[in-house]
Amino acid sequence: MKLKRTLAAVLAAAMTLSMAGCGGGGNSSSGSSTGGSESGTTEIVFWHAMGGVMGEQVDLMIKNFNESQDKVHVTAQYQGKYDDELTKLKSAMTDGSGSGPDIVQVYDIGSKFMVDSGYIVPVEDFIAADESFNKEDIEPNLVSYYSVDGKQYAMPFNSSTPLLYYNKDAFKEAGLDPEKAPETFAQVLEYAEKLTKKDGDKVTQYGFSMAIYGWFFEQLIAVQGEFYADNNNGRTANATKVVFDENGAGLNVVQTWKDLVDSGFVGNFGRNTDDTRNAFIAGRTAMYLDSTAQLASVIKGVGGRFEIGTGNMPRIGEKEDGGVIIGGGSLWIIDNKDEARKNAAWEFVKYASSPEAQAAWMQGTGYFATNVKSYEIESMKTYLEENPNFTTAINQLHNTPTNEFTSGALLGVFPEARAKFEENMELVLMGQQTPEDCIKNVATAVNAAITNYNETTETAK
Amino acid sequence: MKKSAVAAKTSPQNPQKNAIHKTPFQKIEPYLYITPALILFCCFVFFPFAKTLFLSLHSTTPKGEISKFVGFSNFTSLLTSEAFRNSLFVTVKYSLMVVFFSIAAGFITGVLANEKIPGTGLFRTIYSLPMAISSAAASIIFIFVFHPSIGILNYLLGTDIGWLISDKWALFSVVMVTVWMNIGLNFIFILAALQSVPPELYESASLEGAGFFRKHLSITLPCISPTLFFLLIINVINSFQSFAQINLMTKGGPGQSTYVIVYSIYQEAFFNNRFGLACAESVILFFIILALTLVQFRLEKKVTY
């Protein structure tokens, strides 16, 4: 009896452990795609991470592509958020079942991992062999982000930059010019003071707020015209450590951020970007930072209750060669050793970055069009004239110099680096850590992660 | 148990003797019956279990492939890491609160719904409802409830508390959501147990002049203690494994104030790509739950029914 019970206890506990092991196993349920030769149509699978409004737009694009020709048939599969999708990709690629996709959408900070992974064929190979595709049509800043040693690895698909969203009605009420967004963080604070409304001690409308989001930290370092990591942001060679602690850029960001929140005019709604967005939509904060990709959703959420304005990412510091880094995701072609499917994948990638597809994508989501020719389409011109908020992001990008600061860092451990920053930034905002300690702790943790990443990827080679 | 022992003694045929005359097929027959279950267990429990043990002794590449054998260094680095000790501490704090409040809430709602008052059926439905809601859906609802400026909780209380963004409240808030989710199951089990308590006991207690509290303390609690014990085990294991609400509501923050161990495993494996380290954490969690379960079984013997 006693043995039985002990055994039962062991089993019960083992059940708990098995969940961790499942991560390696994977549950990729993609229909393994084999070229359907009878009709001459090549079946390919596209994995993406676009939910909600964006997911609907992806489905629309796929439908249009499939109907536009009969050589390639794409099946889109939503695989959850970017992180989940990448995890599934890893297990699909390592278990040897061939159940992986032919095209996969990966977020900006997964780029270094994809380059190192050996899963993919650089799109440059297809570009070079395809006369009909003109690389100059793609925004140069985007090409530079996804290029390593001059070779383009992925095709930008859903590209964004951070924007300052603001409530024009609140601006008018506070006596501010609703057509002029603050340009520096010093101005943000000035505006925020005027925009803050109080009911007794309780703030009913904050002037400004920003989610505790690692992406903003990276942006604000680039805006200062400084590097995040060594070897010119990991572009000339693999990054071996971060440098934002040495060049002072990191401390500037954390100190500015803390001063904003300490002023009492700036709200802190935590790490979840949705919470800050909802506060803006509900009129509880008059300005906030968010990706341009949310524009369509925010307009839908506000529903005309107040007028929305957008401005450039406010600046810290005065350096001219700083600017925003692009965010979002790109399409990667998987090296599945099947020429027909790889070529079919390229056909879709080419379509997805065509002027027409990107114009429709921009209007449906808020991501700016990656193809410069999109902006020459007549219907697009009319649309942008009527909805000037959609042009803020692309204008901001065009005003950003293309250099190593604004190309963004290539780092295999970005997801971890962001989490470390967010955790330590919270401690600063709660007054439990000085900005100096915050930067020191983030740098130490990220450096250890980089060392580990480089070691394990080295030994595997 | 006793009855069957007596029956065995008095039965004229000794079952042991019969066993000798079994055909080979009869001998393996029982094993055939458990084979399907065993195969399932091997695939979904024992194999991942073995793989986890194996991986915990290795370092892995970002792709999740084995990089090299590192012996116990994953374990030593965990046990000496302050972050890991903190996450153990947070997990214990979290579990204690969840288990206590969940069972207490289940007991109180159970006792209330067991009273013969009008509308009992309605209350029973309401109390067991949270069980039908997935933890992810519940978390999303509570994110809105807890929102510092548009949340209904601050509005109702007239407070200005960042429930999920202040380290003083975040753990408590997540605990409350978990308790809310647990109430349904605990309520149903406790109610079922309450209904099997013989009513004569209450009647004779009433004759002796026992009041409401006295009756529940001296009769109800001992009578339903096997159920309470079962719930204790289930609740402890569940609370050690809470993940969705942490991941969705706080992501372990603010700081590391809600960084429970399962979230830490997830973070190491799928964010930081250190599968070896994550597996080592799972192994440690396994031993903790194993130890707790064994201790609880020991305690069970001391509980009088």
Image (cartoon, helix red, strand yellow):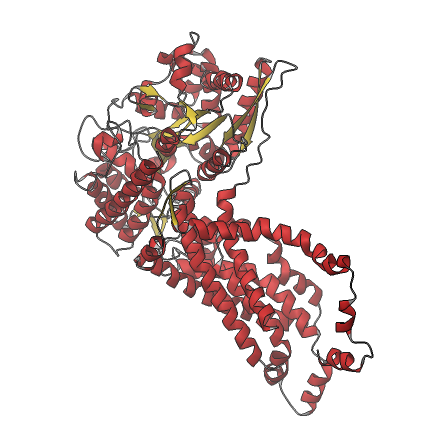
Position of the N terminus of chain A, as image quadrant, is: bottom right
- For image coordinates 72% across by 56% down, the residue present is B33
Q: Nearer the viewer, residue A19 or A107?
A: A19
Q: Quadrant of residue B235?
A: bottom right
Nearer to the camera, B38 or A363: B38
Look at the picture and state if A382 lies above or below A415: above
Left or right of residue B270, residue B49 in this image: right
Q: Is residue B231 above or below residue B263?
A: below
Counting from the top left corner in percent of width and height, residue B7 is at 78, 80
User: Which residue is painted at 49% across and 22% down in the image?
Assistant: A337
Percent of width and height locating residue A292: 39, 30
In the image as oriented, which residue stretches furthest toward the top?
A131
Numbered label tally: 0
Camera-side residue: A212 or A265? A212
Residue A306 coordinates in the image, percent (x, y): 43, 35
Q: Is residue B255 left or right of residue B141?
A: left
* Name of the residue lying farthest toward the right: B12
Q: Nearer the viewer, residue A446 or B57?
A: B57
Query: Which x, y percent locates residue B275?
Result: 41, 46
Using the rendered image of the protein, determine whether residue A157 is visible from the camera's viewpoint.
no
State which quadrant residue A409 falls in: top left
Q: Residue furthest bottom?
A: B208
The residue at the point 40 percent across, 16 percent down is A125
Is the C terminus of chain A in the top left, top right, bottom left or bottom right quadrant? top left
> In this view of the protein, can residue B177 be seen by the observer?
yes
Image side of residue B72 versus residue A340, left or right: left
- In this view, A10 is above or below A22: below
